Amino acid sequence: MTSDLPLWRQGDFRRLWAAQAVSDFGARITREGLPIMVVTLLAASPAQLGLLAAVRGFTALAVGLTAGAFVDRHRRRGLLIASDLGRAVVLIGLPLAAWAGFLNLAEVFIAAALVAAASTFFDIADHAYLPSLVGRAHVTEANARLGTTESIAEMGGPALAGLLFQWLTAPIAVAVNAATYLVSAAFLARIETVEAPPDHEPRVRRWFDGVRTGLAAAWAQPAVRPLLLSAAITGLFGGIFSALYIVFALRVVGLNPALLGITIAFGGAGALLGSLIAQPLARRFGIGPAIIGTALASAAAAMLIPLAPAGAVPGMSVLIVSQILGDAVGTATLILAVSLRQGLLAPNLLGRTGAAFQAVGGGAAVAGALGGGLLGQAVGVRGALFVAAAGLAVGPAIALFTPLRALRKIPQA
């Protein structure tokens, strides 16, 4: 079997890796592109940007509540391919509408919802698929390598998006992203390992039974429980950032789209560092303390964002420092937390537990985005971001008083 080989010799992992590299690169263009599109082309307000972020979060919640059991009952690779193709079809509609002259906020919101649905489905299926492809012994290493690729995409994607929006048009950037999903699907289709058939468990009778099973499994594992709580808290306060960061950088700090893209790209350098330090941190301090420590450091780095002064040079400098530090420790947190979940939880429950995390984080992000948009209208964008940065420290602070603090390594199944 492929999973018996060292990771660097697993051709099918390299194909999965390539697929995710391409789609991750394009996804960064869309992530920054849709808010930039509605700000620059459609003159969206902070409240409308909050609504856009809330649409994404609500979709993650809805899909997370229903998709986990479906993923656990089907072969995951086919679901990954279908998700890629769906995103490509939806995204290509935006540039066509723009070039035809009838692009509006409603169309962007609908496209954002559909892409978020497909992306959430992809993430749930991917989380469940990886251990079966590489073997549990290689799962942390595999996540670290995928994290490295995401970091490179974080460097190149936003910078390219900024240049495309500055020099060309937003629709072209979105069209480029649609093409990346087609390439990703082609790589996934070339994976040769035959996936084991899913367990034939009885179908759930109610739409929420799958995510309820996932929540129960995550809550029952003492080392995973604080990760679930942190997912909710991070989703809540992270939703404020997702709603307001773009408008803060463009209107308060005074960056143009190209400078914004370059600023965000520096976060990719930090994320690359994070993918490299995740395993050494876990070996040095233990996986539990490493997760908690990097999460606290991420919250501290986020506090630099609302401290950024107005003006392209000083403001961009502070935002770059925050991007590098925050993405470095945030990526390390994510790699270690996902690896811990994949190592501790039963393989036949990974789809449902992944969906549970998506639902918890997505539901909280809806509230955060809507509340953040309104808070930004009421107290100003800078003040709302101060609240968000302080809130991000709550999750890891709670984890300090749980068994996660003492966990040195992932127990053997």
Image (spheres, helix red, strand yellow):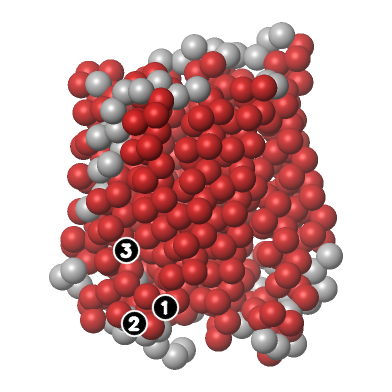
Q: Secondary structure at mark 3?
A: helix
Is mark 2 in CB contact (under 8 Å) with mark 1?
yes
Label 2 crowd bin: few (<14), some (14–19), many (20+), radius 10 Å: few
Amino acid type at mark 3: Thr
Q: Residue at x 21, y 37 (%)?
A: 387
As measured in the structure, the alpha-carbon distance from the residue carrying label 2 to the one carrying label 3 is 13 Å
Q: Residue furthest front?
A: 313
Q: Quadrant of the N terminus?
A: bottom right
Q: Residue at x 49, y 69 (%)?
A: 276
Task: Choose between 199 and 8: the one closer to the eye.
Answer: 8
Q: Residue 116: in sight, yes or no? A: no
Q: Earlier in the sequence, mark 2 or mark 3?
A: 2
Amino acid type at mark 2: Arg
Q: Nearer the viewer, mark 3 or mark 1?
A: 1
The label on residue 280 is 1
Q: Earlier in the sequence, mark 3 or mark 1?
A: 1
Is mark 2 in CB contact (under 8 Å) with mark 3?
no
Task: Choose between 351 and 329: the one closer to the eye.
Answer: 329
Residue 307: percent from the left, percent from the top? 25, 35
The label on residue 294 is 3
Q: Which residue is mark 2?
A: 284
Residue 230: percent from the left, percent from the top? 30, 58
Name the side, left or right, on which 22 lies relative to 343: right
Amino acid type at mark 1: Pro
As measured in the structure, the alpha-carbon distance from the residue carrying label 3 to the one carrying label 1 is 13 Å
